[in-house]
Image: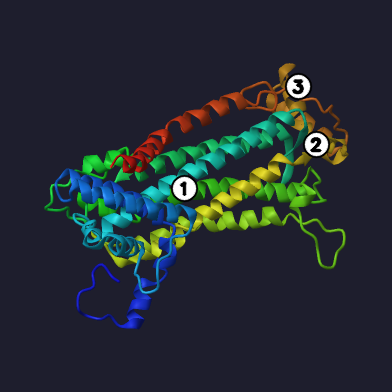
């Protein structure tokens, strides 16, 4: 069954090529396609294109399909082109000709647009929750180990004193910036394209404000051509936000692998999070973080994939956009998986509290000594030279005490302030509005 099929039979090989992986990818969109249809037909009834009785039976049947989709039992049958065709077929089987009326005033173009937006905003909500869990874990561990010093590095050379509190807190603050990116992406996602049809509107008196409210969107994509131009742009914006988040996780994974190695011995990963060797009995490999690093690096390539698929297309719909689903939709599960694994390991990470007992790290205190001399009145350049000569002659010695008091330093991590920044970003999402709209849409069935 094809929504566009009339009398001409399409060549089977052409059909195989053009349908591609749509049936597989559209399973991600099934519950959202139903929600979009529920809002659309509620609006159609309000403008007289459906009767109240027709709306009632359609909503009841769509609720059954929605429940199937949420449970993961929704199936796109062989020979059915996509999720939209399957939903309409199920309605027509159950209700007869009434099921054929749900497509009035819309196109598969705006239908898939609204599906993608509903799916994506739901996925962003999950990413936000998992990112906040990792953030909280990093802050908790930062506070726990805030007094444990470790070497800081530049050029992979020991440089100045750092601390585990400073190191872990740095990744927490990085997640705040990633949350800002997610929030900006969410704002572009949470706009309603439904009613733009094939990109040029409809001669029906559609009430787009109504469907915007029913689906919990902040506003609509007003210009119907722009609504279609948003295909590809939305995926690109969201993928950049995911790439930012993936970049933070990849860097943390690299640090953890390096600090866990015997050459460093700064941290110890939980035994249950490591794997062994088939030949070397002593090995405990950080495979989880190595895979996390690789997956996150792959996710950082996602924006480029989307740009290359959708770049240089004029306004209007093109089938090129179908391929975006294949790289975009599965990316969320991979990102969520990496967040879960990282949170699990960081929460169980243990640190070496005696790193600086090793004399090789004594040079990290040279700047501390230079600053002490400056505070005693020695010009900085002279103090620098004096300490440099002591180090070259092998005479440099210094205690392991540090006195850093400014904002964001070892002695003043500002984790509370960073947590306030995170909460400020979280408050901007307004997920409760969406949840309430979806609840009301589903609850409206009972009153029909």
Q: Is residue 141 above or below residue 202?
A: above
Q: Position of residue 291 (x, y in %)?
A: 65, 57
- The residue sitting at the top extreme is 376
- The residue sitting at the left extreme is 203
Q: CA distance from mark 3 to mark 1?
A: 55 Å
Which mark, residue 373?
A: 3
Element on which disc 1 rests: helix
Residue for badge 1 = 123
Tell which of 68 and 392 is nearer to you: 68
Q: CA distance from mark 1 to mark 2?
A: 48 Å
Residue for badge 2 = 363
Query: If the image is split into quadrants, where does the N terminus sit?
Result: bottom left
Which mark, residue 109?
A: none
Badge 1: residue crowd in 10 Å (few <14, some 14–19, many ≥20): some
Q: Nearer the viewer, mark 3 or mark 1?
A: 1
Element on which disc 2 rests: helix
């Amino acid at each position: 069954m094809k929504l566009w099929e009339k009398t001409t039979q399409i060549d089977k090989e052409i059909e195989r090529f053009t349908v591609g992986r749509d049936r597989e990818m559209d399973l991600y969109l099934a519950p959202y396609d139903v929600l979009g249809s529920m809002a659309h037909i509620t609006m159609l009834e309000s403008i007289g294109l459906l009767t109240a009785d027709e709306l009632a039976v359609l909503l009841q049947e769509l609720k059954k399909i929605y429940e199937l989709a949420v449970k993961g039992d929704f199936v796109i049958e062989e020979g059915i082109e996509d999720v939209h065709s399957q939903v309409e077929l199920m309605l027509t089987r159950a209700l007869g000709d009434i099921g054929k009326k749900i497509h009035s005033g819309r196109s598969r173009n705006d239908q898939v647009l609204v599906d993608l937006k509903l799916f994506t905003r739901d996925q962003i909500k999950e990413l936000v929750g998992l990112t906040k869990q990792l953030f909280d874990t990093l802050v908790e561990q930062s506070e726990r180990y805030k007094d444990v010093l470790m070497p800081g590095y530049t050029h992979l050379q020991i440089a100045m004193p750092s601390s585990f509190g400073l190191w872990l807190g740095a990744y927490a603050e990085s997640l705040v910036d990633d949350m800002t990116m997610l929030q900006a992406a969410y704002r572009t996602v949470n706009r309603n394209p439904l009613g733009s049809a094939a990109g040029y509107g409809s001669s029906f008196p559609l009430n787009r404000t109504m469907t915007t409210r029913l689906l919990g969107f902040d506003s609509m994509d007003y210009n119907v051509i722009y609504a279609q131009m948003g295909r590809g742009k939305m995926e690109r914006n969201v993928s950049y936000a995911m790439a930012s988040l993936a970049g933070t996780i990849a860097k943390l994974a690299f640090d953890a692998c390096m600090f866990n190695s015997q050459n460093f011995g700064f941290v110890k990963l939980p035994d249950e999070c490591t794997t062994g060797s088939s030949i070397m009995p002593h090995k405990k490999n950080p495979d989880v973080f190595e895979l996390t690093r690789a997956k996150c690096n792959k996710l950082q390539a996602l924006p480029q994939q989307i740009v290359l698929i959708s770049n240089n297309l004029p306004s209007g719909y093109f089938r090129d956009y179908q391929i975006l689903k294949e790289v975009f939709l599965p990316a969320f599960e991979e990102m969520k998986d990496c967040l879960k694994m990282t949170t699990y390991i960081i929460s169980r990470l243990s640190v070496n509290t005696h790193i600086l007992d090793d004399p090789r790290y004594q040079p990290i205190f040279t700047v501390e000594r230079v600053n002490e001399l400056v505070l005693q009145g020695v010009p900085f350049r002279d103090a620098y030279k004096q300490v440099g000569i002591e180090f070259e002659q092998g005479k440099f010695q210094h205690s392991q005490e540090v006195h850093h008091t400014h904002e964001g330093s070892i002695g003043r991590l500002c984790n509370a302030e960073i947590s306030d920044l995170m909460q400020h970003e979280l408050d901007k999402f307004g997920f409760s509005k969406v949840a309430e709209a979806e609840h009301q849409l589903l609850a409206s069935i009972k009153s029909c």
